[in-house]
Image (cartoon, coloured by chain):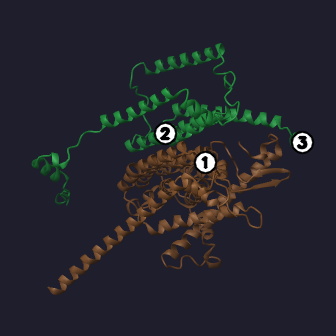
Amino acid sequence: MLAALLADSSGQALAHASAWAVFAVGAAMILTGALGVVLLRNPVHCALMLVITLFGIALEFIDQSADFLAAVQIIVYAGAVVILFLFVIMFLGVDRKEAISAEPTRFQRPLAVLLGVVALVEILALSRIDHWSAGTPSQSGALSGPGSNVQKLGQAIYTGYLLPFEMTAALLVIAVVAAVVLSRRHQPSASEMSELDQEELLSARRFTPPDQGDQS
Amino acid sequence: MGSDPLFANGLNLAVWLILLGKVLVIFLIVLLSVLFMVMYERKAVAYLGVRYGPNRAGPKGWLQSLADGTKLLFKEAFTPRNADKAVYKAAPYLMLVPIMVAFSIVPIGGRITIAHHTTELQLADPQWGILFLLMTSGLAVYGVILAGWASGSKYPLLGSVRASAQMVSYEAVLGLTTATVVLVTGSLSTSTIVAAQSGHWSFVHWNLIHTAVIPFILFSIAITAEMTRAPFDLVEAEEELSGGYNLEYSSIDFAWFYLAEYAALVTNSAIIVTLWFGGPNGPTIDGHSVGPLWFTVKVLVVLYIFVWIRATLPRFRYDQLMDLGWKRLIPASLIMLMVVAGFQATSTSGGNGAGHWLAQREWGLAAVGGAFVLGALLWRAIDVGRQASEVEEARESRLSLERES
Protein backbone atom coordinates (compact mmCIF):
# COMPACT_ATOMS: atom_id res chain seq x y z
CA MET A 1 0.00 0.00 0.00
CA LEU A 2 2.70 2.46 1.04
CA ALA A 3 4.97 1.44 -1.81
CA ALA A 4 2.10 1.79 -4.27
CA LEU A 5 1.35 5.28 -3.02
CA LEU A 6 5.04 6.23 -3.16
CA ALA A 7 5.37 4.86 -6.69
CA ASP A 8 2.30 6.77 -7.83
CA SER A 9 4.29 9.79 -8.96
CA SER A 10 1.41 11.57 -10.66
CA GLY A 11 -0.47 11.38 -7.35
CA GLN A 12 -3.91 11.43 -8.98
CA ALA A 13 -5.47 9.07 -6.46
CA LEU A 14 -4.06 10.87 -3.46
CA ALA A 15 -5.05 14.30 -4.79
CA HIS A 16 -8.56 13.05 -5.46
CA ALA A 17 -8.81 11.50 -2.00
CA SER A 18 -7.59 14.64 -0.27
CA ALA A 19 -10.01 16.86 -2.21
CA TRP A 20 -12.85 14.57 -1.18
CA ALA A 21 -11.63 14.57 2.44
CA VAL A 22 -11.59 18.38 2.50
CA PHE A 23 -15.19 18.51 1.32
CA ALA A 24 -16.32 15.86 3.80
CA VAL A 25 -14.62 17.54 6.75
CA GLY A 26 -16.05 20.93 5.77
CA ALA A 27 -19.56 19.55 5.41
CA ALA A 28 -19.34 17.73 8.73
CA MET A 29 -18.17 20.94 10.43
CA ILE A 30 -21.01 22.97 8.92
CA LEU A 31 -23.66 20.46 9.98
CA THR A 32 -22.26 19.86 13.47
CA GLY A 33 -21.98 23.58 14.09
CA ALA A 34 -25.46 24.33 12.78
CA LEU A 35 -27.03 21.61 14.92
CA GLY A 36 -25.07 22.84 17.90
CA VAL A 37 -26.31 26.41 17.46
CA VAL A 38 -29.89 25.20 17.51
CA LEU A 39 -29.67 22.48 20.15
CA LEU A 40 -27.29 23.77 22.83
CA ARG A 41 -28.78 25.66 25.76
CA ASN A 42 -25.94 27.98 26.72
CA PRO A 43 -25.71 31.08 24.46
CA VAL A 44 -21.90 31.10 24.63
CA HIS A 45 -21.73 27.49 23.47
CA CYS A 46 -24.12 28.37 20.64
CA ALA A 47 -21.86 31.21 19.54
CA LEU A 48 -18.88 28.87 19.50
CA MET A 49 -20.81 26.37 17.43
CA LEU A 50 -21.56 29.18 14.99
CA VAL A 51 -17.80 29.70 14.67
CA ILE A 52 -17.38 26.03 13.74
CA THR A 53 -20.00 26.44 11.02
CA LEU A 54 -18.24 29.53 9.70
CA PHE A 55 -14.97 27.59 9.58
CA GLY A 56 -16.62 24.79 7.66
CA ILE A 57 -17.98 27.27 5.13
CA ALA A 58 -14.54 28.86 4.78
CA LEU A 59 -13.08 25.42 4.13
CA GLU A 60 -15.59 24.80 1.36
CA PHE A 61 -14.81 28.21 -0.12
CA ILE A 62 -11.14 27.26 -0.29
CA ASP A 63 -12.11 23.98 -1.88
CA GLN A 64 -13.88 26.01 -4.58
CA SER A 65 -10.79 28.26 -5.07
CA ALA A 66 -12.57 31.25 -3.53
CA ASP A 67 -9.60 32.08 -1.28
CA PHE A 68 -10.53 35.67 -0.62
CA LEU A 69 -14.07 34.83 0.41
CA ALA A 70 -12.73 32.20 2.80
CA ALA A 71 -10.32 34.63 4.44
CA VAL A 72 -12.94 37.36 4.73
CA GLN A 73 -15.41 34.85 6.12
CA ILE A 74 -13.03 34.14 8.99
CA ILE A 75 -11.75 37.69 9.52
CA VAL A 76 -15.14 39.38 9.50
CA TYR A 77 -17.54 36.79 10.85
CA ALA A 78 -15.42 34.69 13.20
CA GLY A 79 -12.93 37.43 14.04
CA ALA A 80 -15.31 40.32 14.63
CA VAL A 81 -19.04 39.53 14.46
CA VAL A 82 -19.09 36.49 16.75
CA ILE A 83 -16.64 38.23 19.09
CA LEU A 84 -19.19 41.04 19.37
CA PHE A 85 -21.91 38.46 20.03
CA LEU A 86 -19.82 37.01 22.84
CA PHE A 87 -19.07 40.48 24.11
CA VAL A 88 -22.76 41.32 24.35
CA ILE A 89 -23.69 37.93 25.83
CA MET A 90 -21.10 38.32 28.56
CA PHE A 91 -21.77 41.98 29.16
CA LEU A 92 -25.51 41.60 29.55
CA GLY A 93 -25.08 38.51 31.68
CA VAL A 94 -27.45 36.35 29.66
CA ASP A 95 -24.86 33.61 29.60
CA ARG A 96 -26.95 31.21 31.68
CA LYS A 97 -29.05 28.35 30.47
CA GLU A 98 -32.31 29.65 29.13
CA ALA A 99 -35.66 28.18 29.99
CA ILE A 100 -36.96 27.44 26.52
CA SER A 101 -40.06 25.62 27.64
CA ALA A 102 -41.95 28.92 27.69
CA GLU A 103 -42.68 30.15 24.17
CA PRO A 104 -42.17 33.86 23.67
CA THR A 105 -44.49 33.92 20.65
CA ARG A 106 -47.54 31.72 19.97
CA PHE A 107 -47.31 29.32 17.04
CA GLN A 108 -43.56 29.93 16.90
CA ARG A 109 -42.58 26.28 16.83
CA PRO A 110 -45.02 24.93 14.26
CA LEU A 111 -44.27 27.97 12.09
CA ALA A 112 -40.52 27.35 12.36
CA VAL A 113 -40.93 23.70 11.36
CA LEU A 114 -43.14 24.68 8.43
CA LEU A 115 -40.73 27.33 7.16
CA GLY A 116 -37.77 24.98 7.54
CA VAL A 117 -39.49 22.29 5.49
CA VAL A 118 -40.46 24.84 2.81
CA ALA A 119 -36.87 26.11 2.58
CA LEU A 120 -35.49 22.57 2.34
CA VAL A 121 -37.95 21.64 -0.40
CA GLU A 122 -37.09 24.81 -2.30
CA ILE A 123 -33.37 24.13 -2.16
CA LEU A 124 -33.77 20.51 -3.20
CA ALA A 125 -36.12 21.46 -6.05
CA LEU A 126 -33.79 24.19 -7.32
CA SER A 127 -30.83 21.85 -7.20
CA ARG A 128 -32.78 19.42 -9.40
CA ILE A 129 -33.86 22.10 -11.87
CA ASP A 130 -30.67 24.12 -12.29
CA HIS A 131 -26.94 23.68 -11.83
CA TRP A 132 -26.30 26.67 -9.60
CA SER A 133 -25.98 24.83 -6.34
CA ALA A 134 -24.85 21.34 -7.23
CA GLY A 135 -23.20 21.77 -10.60
CA THR A 136 -19.75 22.84 -11.68
CA PRO A 137 -17.76 24.91 -9.16
CA SER A 138 -18.18 28.03 -11.26
CA GLN A 139 -20.02 28.47 -14.50
CA SER A 140 -17.78 31.22 -15.84
CA GLY A 141 -14.55 29.39 -14.96
CA ALA A 142 -13.19 31.56 -12.20
CA LEU A 143 -9.54 30.66 -12.06
CA SER A 144 -8.66 30.44 -15.74
CA GLY A 145 -6.00 32.80 -16.99
CA PRO A 146 -3.29 34.64 -15.09
CA GLY A 147 -3.71 36.42 -11.78
CA SER A 148 -4.81 35.24 -8.40
CA ASN A 149 -8.31 34.98 -7.03
CA VAL A 150 -7.88 38.20 -5.07
CA GLN A 151 -6.61 40.08 -8.14
CA LYS A 152 -9.57 39.03 -10.25
CA LEU A 153 -12.04 39.88 -7.53
CA GLY A 154 -10.46 43.28 -7.00
CA GLN A 155 -10.56 44.07 -10.69
CA ALA A 156 -14.17 43.01 -10.94
CA ILE A 157 -15.22 45.07 -7.92
CA TYR A 158 -13.39 48.23 -8.94
CA THR A 159 -14.33 48.17 -12.63
CA GLY A 160 -17.53 46.39 -13.58
CA TYR A 161 -19.22 46.45 -10.20
CA LEU A 162 -17.92 49.76 -8.87
CA LEU A 163 -21.32 51.36 -8.36
CA PRO A 164 -22.92 48.49 -6.38
CA PHE A 165 -19.75 48.18 -4.33
CA GLU A 166 -19.66 51.87 -3.42
CA MET A 167 -23.37 51.87 -2.70
CA THR A 168 -22.96 48.95 -0.31
CA ALA A 169 -20.15 50.80 1.42
CA ALA A 170 -22.27 53.95 1.74
CA LEU A 171 -25.18 51.90 3.10
CA LEU A 172 -23.00 50.38 5.79
CA VAL A 173 -21.63 53.76 6.83
CA ILE A 174 -25.16 55.18 6.96
CA ALA A 175 -26.23 52.26 9.14
CA VAL A 176 -23.34 52.81 11.55
CA VAL A 177 -23.96 56.56 11.81
CA ALA A 178 -27.68 55.98 12.27
CA ALA A 179 -27.07 53.47 15.04
CA VAL A 180 -24.83 55.92 16.85
CA VAL A 181 -27.31 58.78 16.46
CA LEU A 182 -30.28 56.70 17.59
CA SER A 183 -28.65 55.01 20.54
CA ARG A 184 -26.70 57.91 21.96
CA ARG A 185 -28.69 60.19 24.20
CA HIS A 186 -27.58 63.81 24.31
CA GLN A 187 -25.95 64.59 27.62
CA PRO A 188 -25.77 68.30 28.43
CA SER A 189 -22.26 69.46 29.17
CA ALA A 190 -21.56 71.44 32.33
CA SER A 191 -21.65 74.79 30.54
CA GLU A 192 -25.11 74.05 29.18
CA MET A 193 -26.58 73.30 32.60
CA SER A 194 -27.99 75.70 35.09
CA GLU A 195 -26.13 76.13 38.35
CA LEU A 196 -28.86 74.33 40.24
CA ASP A 197 -28.61 71.26 37.97
CA GLN A 198 -24.85 71.18 38.38
CA GLU A 199 -25.23 71.18 42.15
CA GLU A 200 -27.74 68.35 41.93
CA LEU A 201 -25.44 66.28 39.72
CA LEU A 202 -22.53 66.81 42.08
CA SER A 203 -24.46 65.84 45.16
CA ALA A 204 -25.77 62.72 43.41
CA ARG A 205 -22.23 61.71 42.52
CA ARG A 206 -20.86 62.30 45.97
CA PHE A 207 -20.11 59.07 47.79
CA THR A 208 -22.20 58.52 50.88
CA PRO A 209 -20.95 55.72 53.13
CA PRO A 210 -23.61 53.19 54.13
CA ASP A 211 -25.02 53.68 57.59
CA GLN A 212 -23.40 51.00 59.71
CA GLY A 213 -24.68 52.03 63.12
CA ASP A 214 -27.88 49.96 62.96
CA GLN A 215 -26.23 46.64 62.36
CA SER A 216 -25.09 45.81 65.87
CA MET B 1 -0.16 27.17 -3.19
CA GLY B 2 2.06 29.39 -5.20
CA SER B 3 5.64 28.99 -6.27
CA ASP B 4 6.82 26.15 -4.05
CA PRO B 5 8.50 23.62 -6.38
CA LEU B 6 7.48 20.86 -3.99
CA PHE B 7 4.06 20.69 -5.61
CA ALA B 8 5.31 20.86 -9.20
CA ASN B 9 4.75 17.13 -9.73
CA GLY B 10 1.47 16.92 -7.88
CA LEU B 11 0.87 15.29 -4.53
CA ASN B 12 2.34 11.96 -3.58
CA LEU B 13 3.27 10.30 -0.33
CA ALA B 14 6.84 11.63 -0.23
CA VAL B 15 5.50 15.17 -0.61
CA TRP B 16 3.03 14.52 2.19
CA LEU B 17 5.81 13.26 4.44
CA ILE B 18 8.00 16.28 3.71
CA LEU B 19 5.05 18.54 4.50
CA LEU B 20 4.52 16.72 7.77
CA GLY B 21 8.22 17.13 8.59
CA LYS B 22 7.98 20.86 7.87
CA VAL B 23 4.98 21.16 10.18
CA LEU B 24 6.94 19.47 12.96
CA VAL B 25 10.00 21.64 12.39
CA ILE B 26 7.95 24.85 12.50
CA PHE B 27 6.27 23.63 15.67
CA LEU B 28 9.66 22.92 17.27
CA ILE B 29 11.08 26.26 16.13
CA VAL B 30 8.22 28.10 17.82
CA LEU B 31 8.46 26.03 21.01
CA LEU B 32 12.23 26.37 21.35
CA SER B 33 12.15 30.06 20.51
CA VAL B 34 9.65 30.51 23.36
CA LEU B 35 12.02 28.80 25.79
CA PHE B 36 14.76 31.12 24.55
CA MET B 37 12.54 34.20 24.48
CA VAL B 38 11.45 33.93 28.12
CA MET B 39 15.08 34.02 29.20
CA TYR B 40 16.05 36.62 26.59
CA GLU B 41 13.34 38.93 27.93
CA ARG B 42 14.22 38.40 31.58
CA LYS B 43 17.93 38.91 30.91
CA ALA B 44 17.28 42.02 28.82
CA VAL B 45 14.86 43.53 31.34
CA ALA B 46 17.34 42.83 34.12
CA TYR B 47 20.10 44.46 32.08
CA LEU B 48 17.93 47.51 31.40
CA GLY B 49 17.05 47.71 35.10
CA VAL B 50 20.69 47.24 36.18
CA ARG B 51 19.96 43.96 37.93
CA TYR B 52 21.48 40.48 37.64
CA GLY B 53 18.34 38.69 36.50
CA PRO B 54 18.00 34.90 36.79
CA ASN B 55 21.47 33.36 37.11
CA ARG B 56 21.04 30.09 39.01
CA ALA B 57 19.66 27.33 36.75
CA GLY B 58 22.22 26.16 34.21
CA PRO B 59 25.08 28.16 32.72
CA LYS B 60 24.44 31.83 33.52
CA GLY B 61 20.83 30.95 34.27
CA TRP B 62 19.91 30.08 30.68
CA LEU B 63 17.98 26.96 31.74
CA GLN B 64 15.66 28.95 34.02
CA SER B 65 12.69 28.85 31.64
CA LEU B 66 13.06 25.08 31.29
CA ALA B 67 13.06 24.77 35.08
CA ASP B 68 10.01 27.01 35.37
CA GLY B 69 8.18 25.01 32.73
CA THR B 70 8.93 21.72 34.48
CA LYS B 71 7.78 23.17 37.77
CA LEU B 72 4.48 24.27 36.21
CA LEU B 73 3.91 20.79 34.79
CA PHE B 74 4.04 19.19 38.23
CA LYS B 75 1.65 21.61 39.89
CA GLU B 76 -1.94 20.67 40.62
CA ALA B 77 -4.28 21.22 37.69
CA PHE B 78 -7.15 22.95 39.41
CA THR B 79 -10.59 23.60 37.93
CA PRO B 80 -12.85 26.08 39.74
CA ARG B 81 -16.30 24.77 40.66
CA ASN B 82 -18.03 27.59 38.78
CA ALA B 83 -16.05 26.96 35.62
CA ASP B 84 -17.63 25.88 32.36
CA LYS B 85 -15.51 22.71 32.15
CA ALA B 86 -15.27 22.13 28.40
CA VAL B 87 -14.62 25.75 27.43
CA TYR B 88 -12.28 26.17 30.40
CA LYS B 89 -10.13 23.30 29.18
CA ALA B 90 -10.28 24.34 25.52
CA ALA B 91 -9.44 28.04 25.95
CA PRO B 92 -5.62 27.69 26.29
CA TYR B 93 -5.46 25.66 23.10
CA LEU B 94 -7.71 28.12 21.28
CA MET B 95 -5.16 30.77 22.16
CA LEU B 96 -2.11 28.73 21.20
CA VAL B 97 -3.24 27.26 17.89
CA PRO B 98 -3.84 30.45 15.82
CA ILE B 99 -0.47 31.80 16.90
CA MET B 100 1.36 28.60 16.00
CA VAL B 101 -0.46 28.46 12.67
CA ALA B 102 0.47 32.06 11.86
CA PHE B 103 4.14 31.15 11.77
CA SER B 104 3.52 28.81 8.84
CA ILE B 105 3.32 31.67 6.32
CA VAL B 106 6.62 33.24 7.39
CA PRO B 107 9.37 32.70 4.79
CA ILE B 108 12.59 31.81 6.60
CA GLY B 109 14.66 32.04 3.44
CA GLY B 110 16.11 29.86 0.72
CA ARG B 111 15.30 26.39 -0.49
CA ILE B 112 16.23 22.95 0.70
CA THR B 113 16.38 19.61 -1.13
CA ILE B 114 15.18 16.48 0.67
CA ALA B 115 15.17 13.18 -1.29
CA HIS B 116 15.05 14.84 -4.72
CA HIS B 117 12.25 17.14 -3.65
CA THR B 118 13.19 20.81 -3.49
CA THR B 119 11.07 22.93 -1.19
CA GLU B 120 10.93 26.43 0.20
CA LEU B 121 11.82 27.05 3.84
CA GLN B 122 8.25 28.10 4.45
CA LEU B 123 5.41 25.81 5.39
CA ALA B 124 2.66 27.36 3.32
CA ASP B 125 2.67 30.12 0.74
CA PRO B 126 -0.95 30.87 -0.05
CA GLN B 127 -1.61 33.70 -2.47
CA TRP B 128 -3.62 35.38 0.27
CA GLY B 129 -0.91 35.08 2.94
CA ILE B 130 -1.53 38.46 4.52
CA LEU B 131 -5.22 37.73 4.89
CA PHE B 132 -4.24 34.51 6.63
CA LEU B 133 -2.21 36.58 9.05
CA LEU B 134 -5.14 38.89 9.80
CA MET B 135 -7.31 35.82 10.19
CA THR B 136 -5.11 34.25 12.85
CA SER B 137 -4.75 37.50 14.75
CA GLY B 138 -8.53 37.83 14.73
CA LEU B 139 -8.96 34.32 16.08
CA ALA B 140 -6.44 34.77 18.88
CA VAL B 141 -9.10 36.81 20.69
CA TYR B 142 -11.13 33.66 21.35
CA GLY B 143 -8.59 32.18 23.73
CA VAL B 144 -8.58 35.28 25.92
CA ILE B 145 -12.30 35.99 25.92
CA LEU B 146 -13.30 32.37 26.55
CA ALA B 147 -10.70 31.82 29.25
CA GLY B 148 -12.07 34.81 31.12
CA TRP B 149 -15.68 33.77 30.73
CA ALA B 150 -15.25 30.07 31.41
CA SER B 151 -13.39 30.66 34.68
CA GLY B 152 -16.70 31.63 36.23
CA SER B 153 -15.42 34.51 38.29
CA LYS B 154 -15.53 38.29 38.00
CA TYR B 155 -11.94 39.43 37.57
CA PRO B 156 -11.07 37.12 34.70
CA LEU B 157 -14.33 38.12 33.01
CA LEU B 158 -13.48 41.81 33.31
CA GLY B 159 -10.02 41.11 31.92
CA SER B 160 -11.38 39.21 28.97
CA VAL B 161 -14.02 41.81 28.13
CA ARG B 162 -11.28 44.42 28.10
CA ALA B 163 -9.17 42.18 25.93
CA SER B 164 -11.84 41.57 23.34
CA ALA B 165 -12.60 45.29 22.99
CA GLN B 166 -8.92 46.13 22.75
CA MET B 167 -8.01 43.46 20.23
CA VAL B 168 -10.99 44.11 17.97
CA SER B 169 -10.25 47.86 18.02
CA TYR B 170 -6.61 47.55 17.07
CA GLU B 171 -7.27 45.02 14.35
CA ALA B 172 -8.50 47.85 12.12
CA VAL B 173 -5.14 49.61 12.37
CA LEU B 174 -3.38 46.34 11.71
CA GLY B 175 -5.40 45.80 8.54
CA LEU B 176 -5.01 49.35 7.25
CA THR B 177 -1.24 49.47 7.73
CA THR B 178 -0.80 46.03 6.21
CA ALA B 179 -2.76 47.35 3.24
CA THR B 180 0.02 49.89 2.58
CA VAL B 181 2.49 47.02 2.27
CA VAL B 182 0.14 45.25 -0.10
CA LEU B 183 -0.18 48.50 -2.09
CA VAL B 184 3.55 48.93 -2.69
CA THR B 185 4.12 45.22 -3.33
CA GLY B 186 1.02 44.43 -5.33
CA SER B 187 0.67 41.00 -3.77
CA LEU B 188 -0.82 39.34 -0.72
CA SER B 189 1.66 36.47 -0.71
CA THR B 190 4.40 36.71 1.91
CA SER B 191 7.05 35.19 -0.35
CA THR B 192 6.28 37.76 -3.06
CA ILE B 193 6.43 40.53 -0.47
CA VAL B 194 9.88 39.34 0.57
CA ALA B 195 11.03 38.96 -3.02
CA ALA B 196 9.88 42.50 -3.82
CA GLN B 197 12.12 43.84 -1.05
CA SER B 198 15.30 42.21 -2.34
CA GLY B 199 17.97 43.91 -4.42
CA HIS B 200 21.36 45.51 -4.23
CA TRP B 201 21.71 47.61 -1.07
CA SER B 202 18.96 45.56 0.46
CA PHE B 203 17.66 47.98 3.05
CA VAL B 204 16.81 50.61 0.45
CA HIS B 205 14.14 48.28 -0.89
CA TRP B 206 12.59 47.47 2.43
CA ASN B 207 8.91 48.24 2.77
CA LEU B 208 9.88 50.34 5.77
CA ILE B 209 11.30 52.84 3.27
CA HIS B 210 8.75 52.28 0.52
CA THR B 211 5.83 53.08 2.80
CA ALA B 212 7.52 56.07 4.46
CA VAL B 213 8.24 54.66 7.95
CA ILE B 214 4.99 55.90 9.56
CA PRO B 215 2.81 52.86 8.68
CA PHE B 216 5.47 50.65 10.26
CA ILE B 217 5.30 52.63 13.51
CA LEU B 218 1.50 52.39 13.51
CA PHE B 219 1.69 48.66 12.73
CA SER B 220 4.10 48.06 15.60
CA ILE B 221 1.90 49.91 18.07
CA ALA B 222 -1.17 48.03 16.87
CA ILE B 223 0.50 44.64 17.04
CA THR B 224 1.77 45.38 20.55
CA ALA B 225 -1.80 46.12 21.57
CA GLU B 226 -3.03 43.07 19.70
CA MET B 227 -0.64 40.88 21.70
CA THR B 228 -1.79 42.72 24.87
CA ARG B 229 1.84 43.35 25.73
CA ALA B 230 3.22 46.21 27.77
CA PRO B 231 2.42 49.11 27.63
CA PHE B 232 -1.02 47.83 26.54
CA ASP B 233 -1.23 44.87 28.96
CA LEU B 234 -4.41 46.05 30.69
CA VAL B 235 -5.81 42.59 30.14
CA GLU B 236 -3.67 41.28 32.96
CA ALA B 237 -3.33 44.39 35.08
CA GLU B 238 -2.47 42.80 38.40
CA GLU B 239 -3.26 45.94 40.39
CA GLU B 240 -6.85 46.16 39.15
CA LEU B 241 -7.76 42.63 38.13
CA SER B 242 -5.35 40.62 40.28
CA GLY B 243 -4.11 38.85 37.18
CA GLY B 244 -6.69 39.11 34.43
CA TYR B 245 -8.12 36.44 32.17
CA ASN B 246 -5.76 33.63 33.24
CA LEU B 247 -6.26 34.19 36.97
CA GLU B 248 -8.04 30.89 37.63
CA TYR B 249 -5.66 28.78 35.60
CA SER B 250 -2.88 26.69 37.04
CA SER B 251 -0.37 24.04 36.06
CA ILE B 252 -0.16 23.00 32.41
CA ASP B 253 -3.14 25.15 31.36
CA PHE B 254 -1.44 28.25 32.67
CA ALA B 255 1.75 27.14 30.95
CA TRP B 256 -0.12 27.08 27.63
CA PHE B 257 -1.16 30.71 28.13
CA TYR B 258 2.39 31.68 28.94
CA LEU B 259 3.61 29.76 25.92
CA ALA B 260 1.01 31.38 23.68
CA GLU B 261 1.97 34.84 24.87
CA TYR B 262 5.62 34.38 24.00
CA ALA B 263 4.88 32.43 20.84
CA ALA B 264 2.81 35.42 19.75
CA LEU B 265 5.76 37.68 20.46
CA VAL B 266 8.12 35.57 18.36
CA THR B 267 5.63 35.05 15.54
CA ASN B 268 4.68 38.70 15.34
CA SER B 269 8.33 39.75 15.33
CA ALA B 270 8.90 37.34 12.46
CA ILE B 271 5.92 38.87 10.66
CA ILE B 272 7.22 42.41 11.25
CA VAL B 273 10.56 41.34 9.76
CA THR B 274 8.77 39.77 6.79
CA LEU B 275 6.52 42.72 6.07
CA TRP B 276 8.80 45.66 6.73
CA PHE B 277 12.43 44.57 6.96
CA GLY B 278 12.84 42.36 3.91
CA GLY B 279 12.54 39.02 5.71
CA PRO B 280 15.59 36.85 5.06
CA ASN B 281 17.10 39.24 2.49
CA GLY B 282 20.63 40.37 3.18
CA PRO B 283 24.18 40.36 1.88
CA THR B 284 25.66 37.00 0.91
CA ILE B 285 28.62 35.56 2.80
CA ASP B 286 31.30 33.96 0.55
CA GLY B 287 28.77 33.83 -2.24
CA HIS B 288 26.34 31.72 -0.22
CA SER B 289 23.00 33.27 0.56
CA VAL B 290 22.39 32.99 4.29
CA GLY B 291 18.73 33.87 4.53
CA PRO B 292 17.93 32.08 7.80
CA LEU B 293 20.86 33.82 9.50
CA TRP B 294 19.73 37.31 8.50
CA PHE B 295 16.17 36.37 9.38
CA THR B 296 17.23 35.29 12.88
CA VAL B 297 19.34 38.40 13.43
CA LYS B 298 16.51 40.72 12.38
CA VAL B 299 13.99 38.87 14.54
CA LEU B 300 16.31 39.11 17.54
CA VAL B 301 16.65 42.87 17.05
CA VAL B 302 12.87 43.32 16.81
CA LEU B 303 12.37 41.12 19.89
CA TYR B 304 14.86 43.24 21.79
CA ILE B 305 12.93 46.39 20.86
CA PHE B 306 9.73 44.81 22.22
CA VAL B 307 11.50 44.00 25.49
CA TRP B 308 12.97 47.48 25.60
CA ILE B 309 9.52 49.02 25.22
CA ARG B 310 8.19 46.80 28.00
CA ALA B 311 11.02 47.80 30.32
CA THR B 312 10.58 51.51 29.58
CA LEU B 313 6.93 52.50 29.26
CA PRO B 314 4.31 52.46 32.02
CA ARG B 315 0.93 50.87 31.36
CA PHE B 316 -1.76 52.90 29.59
CA ARG B 317 -5.06 53.72 31.24
CA TYR B 318 -8.04 52.07 29.56
CA ASP B 319 -9.61 55.25 28.13
CA GLN B 320 -6.18 56.39 26.89
CA LEU B 321 -5.82 53.07 25.13
CA MET B 322 -9.17 53.40 23.36
CA ASP B 323 -8.55 57.07 22.48
CA LEU B 324 -5.17 56.19 21.02
CA GLY B 325 -6.67 53.41 18.94
CA TRP B 326 -9.78 55.05 17.58
CA LYS B 327 -8.92 58.76 17.50
CA ARG B 328 -5.22 58.72 16.62
CA LEU B 329 -4.08 55.46 15.06
CA ILE B 330 -7.04 54.70 12.79
CA PRO B 331 -7.17 58.21 11.23
CA ALA B 332 -3.38 58.26 10.92
CA SER B 333 -3.27 54.89 9.21
CA LEU B 334 -6.13 55.89 6.88
CA ILE B 335 -4.23 59.05 5.91
CA MET B 336 -1.03 57.09 5.33
CA LEU B 337 -2.91 54.57 3.22
CA MET B 338 -4.20 57.43 1.04
CA VAL B 339 -0.74 59.03 0.79
CA VAL B 340 0.96 55.80 -0.19
CA ALA B 341 -1.85 54.98 -2.64
CA GLY B 342 -1.46 58.42 -4.20
CA PHE B 343 2.26 57.92 -4.61
CA GLN B 344 1.76 54.50 -6.14
CA ALA B 345 -0.85 55.83 -8.55
CA THR B 346 1.27 58.76 -9.74
CA SER B 347 4.59 56.94 -9.69
CA THR B 348 6.01 56.80 -13.21
CA SER B 349 9.09 54.77 -12.36
CA GLY B 350 6.92 51.73 -11.81
CA GLY B 351 8.19 50.48 -8.48
CA ASN B 352 11.46 48.77 -7.66
CA GLY B 353 14.69 48.78 -9.54
CA ALA B 354 13.93 51.49 -12.08
CA GLY B 355 16.62 54.15 -12.09
CA HIS B 356 18.93 55.12 -9.28
CA TRP B 357 17.35 54.66 -5.88
CA LEU B 358 17.91 58.28 -4.86
CA ALA B 359 15.94 59.40 -7.90
CA GLN B 360 12.87 57.47 -6.83
CA ARG B 361 10.04 59.40 -5.28
CA GLU B 362 9.47 56.74 -2.63
CA TRP B 363 12.81 57.71 -1.20
CA GLY B 364 11.69 61.32 -0.84
CA LEU B 365 8.46 60.20 0.79
CA ALA B 366 10.44 57.97 3.15
CA ALA B 367 12.71 60.87 4.07
CA VAL B 368 9.69 63.05 4.88
CA GLY B 369 8.06 60.24 6.87
CA GLY B 370 11.23 59.44 8.78
CA ALA B 371 11.82 63.11 9.53
CA PHE B 372 8.26 63.35 10.82
CA VAL B 373 8.74 60.39 13.17
CA LEU B 374 12.09 61.67 14.42
CA GLY B 375 10.64 65.16 14.88
CA ALA B 376 7.73 63.79 16.90
CA LEU B 377 10.12 61.80 19.11
CA LEU B 378 12.34 64.83 19.61
CA TRP B 379 9.36 67.05 20.44
CA ARG B 380 8.15 64.46 22.94
CA ALA B 381 11.60 64.22 24.54
CA ILE B 382 11.81 68.01 24.88
CA ASP B 383 8.32 68.07 26.35
CA VAL B 384 9.16 65.40 28.92
CA GLY B 385 12.39 67.20 29.79
CA ARG B 386 10.56 70.49 30.26
CA GLN B 387 7.94 68.89 32.51
CA ALA B 388 10.68 67.29 34.58
CA SER B 389 12.50 70.59 35.00
CA GLU B 390 9.23 72.31 35.96
CA VAL B 391 8.65 69.70 38.65
CA GLU B 392 12.20 70.19 39.83
CA GLU B 393 11.79 73.98 39.97
CA ALA B 394 8.54 73.68 41.90
CA ARG B 395 10.22 71.36 44.39
CA GLU B 396 13.16 73.70 44.85
CA SER B 397 10.97 76.76 45.34
CA ARG B 398 8.91 74.85 47.90
CA LEU B 399 12.06 73.76 49.71
CA SER B 400 13.38 77.31 49.80
CA LEU B 401 10.01 78.53 51.13
CA GLU B 402 10.14 75.92 53.87
CA ARG B 403 13.67 76.93 54.74
CA GLU B 404 12.65 80.59 55.06
CA SER B 405 9.72 79.88 57.31
Where does label 1 land, which residue? B351
Chain letter corresponding to the colour green: A
User: SS of the residue at dot 2?
Assistant: helix
User: How many angstroms separate mark 2 from mark 1 (CA)?
Assistant: 40 Å
Where does label 2 land, which residue? A82
Q: Residue at x 45, y 32 (%)?
A: A169
Q: Are marks 3 and 2 on the same chain?
A: yes
User: SS of the residue at dot 1?
Assistant: loop
Q: Is residue A59 above or below residue A109?
A: below
Q: Are marks 2 and 1 on the same chain?
A: no
Q: Chain B's shade in the image?
A: brown
B191 lies left or right of A200: right
Q: Where the N terminus of chain A falls, by quadrant? A: top right
Of A44 and A57, the residue lying toward us? A57
Of A79 and A175, the residue lying toward us? A175
User: SS of the residue at dot 3?
Assistant: helix
Q: Residues within 10 Å of mark 1 (few under 14, many from 20)?
A: some
Q: Is residue A116 above or below residue A51?
A: above
Question: Marks 1 and 3: which is nearer the front?
Answer: 1
